[in-house]
Amino acid sequence: MKWVIGALILVGLGVVLRRLLRLDQALTRRVGGLLPLSADRAAIYQAIAQEVETQATILGVSLNDAIAEREACRPDIAWRLVRLAASEWDRLAEIVTSLLNAIAKHMPAARVIVPARSMVAHRFKSPVMLDYVRMHELLDQLVFRAKLRFQLHLHILRRAVETLSGEFRRSYRYAERTEDRPPELWNRLDLYFHDFDLVTKETLLAFRAFLACLPHAGLEEFAADLHAIMRRGVRSTTIPANR
């Protein structure tokens, strides 16, 4: 009889501790692999995500159309589209970099451990990104504190944007100056865009995760910084702070 009473006490303590540690909530938050957002946070996320995804789509369409025009033996039209894509690339890179900087700025205000998603080399295609991500995969395994891993993740994303943008501009400017545009150049541009698009998606995932962990007291200031970023973008986007 004593062991039955002891077992019941242990079960009761387990339930109490589970609630105190909010393990049930943690499991609920992890459903689908993403943390749910409140209405005001979801509105902030959607405003930024829509802008980033729109710019990425415009960039992708421009490059795809340029490749199609080149294959149709219309090189002049193809290169005009590449010029348009170069402008769109710079605009998107500025938005993504500013977003990563804003997250890093408000990182000290995060009230809980921020989940980090590791970047893996096999998802990338350009040689420069394969080498870069492989170099950081081991370092990522050596960092155990979740918040520090998230900060490292932000650094890797920011450097990835800078690296891909630099490689894209270097290839574009050389071809613009020399008019030397072999098939290998077009393949490089295509690979750079694939990896850049992947980095923008990883940035949005990091942004969403950070929003879920930011306390309400810091939300309005963070939203104001995001609104300033969007004012420098193509369209004026309203970033709601409260509802």
Image (cartoon, grey):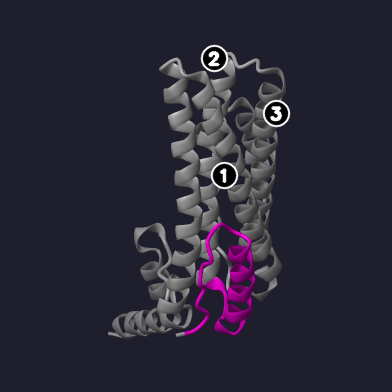
Tell me which amino acid carries mark 3: Arg
Q: Secondary structure at mark 3?
A: helix
Nearer-N-terminus badge (1/3): 1
Q: Nearer the viewer, residue 65 or 36?
A: 65
Res 196 label = none
Please say if 195 is above or below 184.
below
Res 173 label = 3
Residue 242 lies, in percent from the top left, at 49, 84
Q: Please tell me in which quadrant of the rendered image residue 162 appears.
A: top right
Badge 1: residue crowd in 10 Å (few <14, some 14–19, many ≥20): many
Q: Which residues are magenta?
A: 213-242
Please say if 146 is above or below 112.
above
Task: Report whether residue 144 is seen.
Answer: no
Residue 153 lies, in percent from the top left, at 63, 52
Q: Nearer the viewer, residue 73 or 122?
A: 73
Q: Nearer the viewer, residue 227 or 36?
A: 227
- Do the residues bearing badges 3 and 2 touch, measured as CB atoms within 8 Å? no
Asked if residue 26 lies left or right of residue 166, the reply is: left
Label 1 sits on residue: 88
Tell me which amino acid carries mark 2: Pro
Label 2 sits on residue: 183
Residue visible at 55% across and 83% down?
A: 216
Queried whether the magenta region covers residue 17, the answer comes back as no
Residue visible at 43% across and 17% down?
A: 71
Q: Nearer the viewer, residue 210 or 192?
A: 192
Queried whether the magenta region covers residue 214, the answer comes back as yes
